[in-house]
Amino acid sequence: MNRGIETFFQDAFDGLKHTEGLKLRLLKGAGAGAPDERVVWSLPRTGALARFLGAATHRNGYVIEQWSAFPSVAKQIRAFRPHVVFYSDANLGFLLFRLRQVICVPYTLLFSNGGPVHSPFVRTDYIHQVAPSHYQEALDAGEPPEKHFMVPYGINLIAAPTRPSVEERHALRRRLGLPLDRPVILSVGWIRRVHKRMDYLIQETARLPGPRPFLQLLGAIDEGSAEILTLGGQLLGSDGFAAGSVAYEKVFTYYRAADCFVLASPQEGFGRVYLEALMHGLPVIAYRNPVTEYIFGGEAILADLSGPGALERALAEALRKSPDPAAAQIRWAAVRDRFSWPVLAPSYRRMFYTCALGRLSSTVRSFP
């Protein structure tokens, strides 16, 4: 699945696998096997059987996917005998917690709270918080500080962005089916009204005076996406709007072709797409909240995007500015200096070691 949690674990494996003192194995639900990567069987959440069983058990296809993966995951744990199981799929984690003695491996569970899930955290051993506000919320709720670590998500850094020639930019846009004569707004996320508020983004883009920019949405498309696709066609037309789901590696091509990035969701557990847009040098517009303030540190347009006209004004501000190679370099450097794996690897290593050794203390484990 091309969403933050899944792409983070692949990125973390790739970014940390050469860290001294760590031996990692990645379990994944699809793709090809590779050294220290194993594909485990499950019922895909998007399949008809998983959806049927989810409805029959008053859950959903995602829960069924996690439950069905348990036997394969348990087999891998018995073979690899890890000290730490690092995960974000909560329902799978609940089974690993309850059936640890059945698996017969004394692993420690470290839940990466990218959702985020809120306290109490009673069916895991440790919690990886990815933003200071989530960490503080847990402590304010009475959670023991020794169970929680604050270490942000990392990302595999690309080369510093360079400004392509007009010919290169046109060739890239032709390949992607994007217009050559208008700015392109990009948004990457679940293409639905709920949470990501893609409907609001379409409506605000439609408020801009002509000639309007082109709006490209990329993300998971499901049964709830139909109303977004219809709304985009109605308000922006086929020549002003497109939506699709592409492989994760191809998303980066769209970042290179876009003029600005927008995500209108009021809250994100972290929002790795923010890092992706920043390291491509794009101006970013996002909802102002404690998480975005922490991630961007001033390198974005943050605003209250709750009402009509708010995003329209932010878009007009972002698109008025000429492309600025110096500003693009600053955005890329902000990711390099705070969220790249060479910077974060020591903190992740320390977190894994503390979990593996079970060193509980009253020390606040918050790493910059």
Image (cartoon, rainbow, N blue to C red):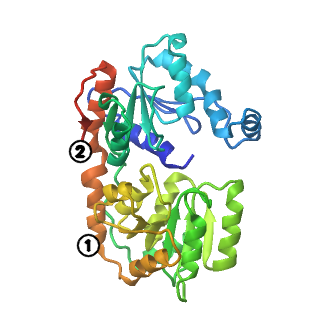
Whether residue 272 is situated above or below residue 34 in the rendered picture: below
Q: CA distance from mark 2 to mark 1?
A: 26 Å
Q: Residue at x 41, y 50 (%)?
A: 270
Whether residue 305 is situated above or below residue 356 in the rendered picture: below
Answer with mark 2 or mark 1, whichever residue precedes in sequence.
1
Residue 272 visible in image: yes
**Which residue has dot 2 on it?**
368
Residue type for callout 1: Ala
Q: Secondary structure at mark 2?
A: loop
93 to the left or right of 354: right
Residue type for callout 2: Pro
Residue 238 visible in image: no
State the image quarter where residue 66 is shown: top right
State the image quarter where residue 344 is shown: top left
Q: Residue at x 33, y 24 (%)?
A: 355
* Residue 175 image position (x, y, % from top left): 55, 69
- Classed neighbour count for the residue bearing mark 1: other residues with Cα under 10 Å, few (<14), some (14–19), many (≥20): few
Q: Nearer the viewer, residue 260 or 142?
A: 142
State the image quarter where residue 342 is shown: top left
* Residue 115 image position (x, y, % from top left): 48, 44
Q: Secondary structure at mark 1?
A: helix
**Which residue has dot 1 on it?**
326
* Residue 333 image position (x, y, % from top left): 26, 60
For the C terminus, the image quarter is top left
Q: Nearer the viewer, residue 62 or 323?
A: 62
Q: Are marks 2 and 1 in contact (CB under 8 Å)?
A: no
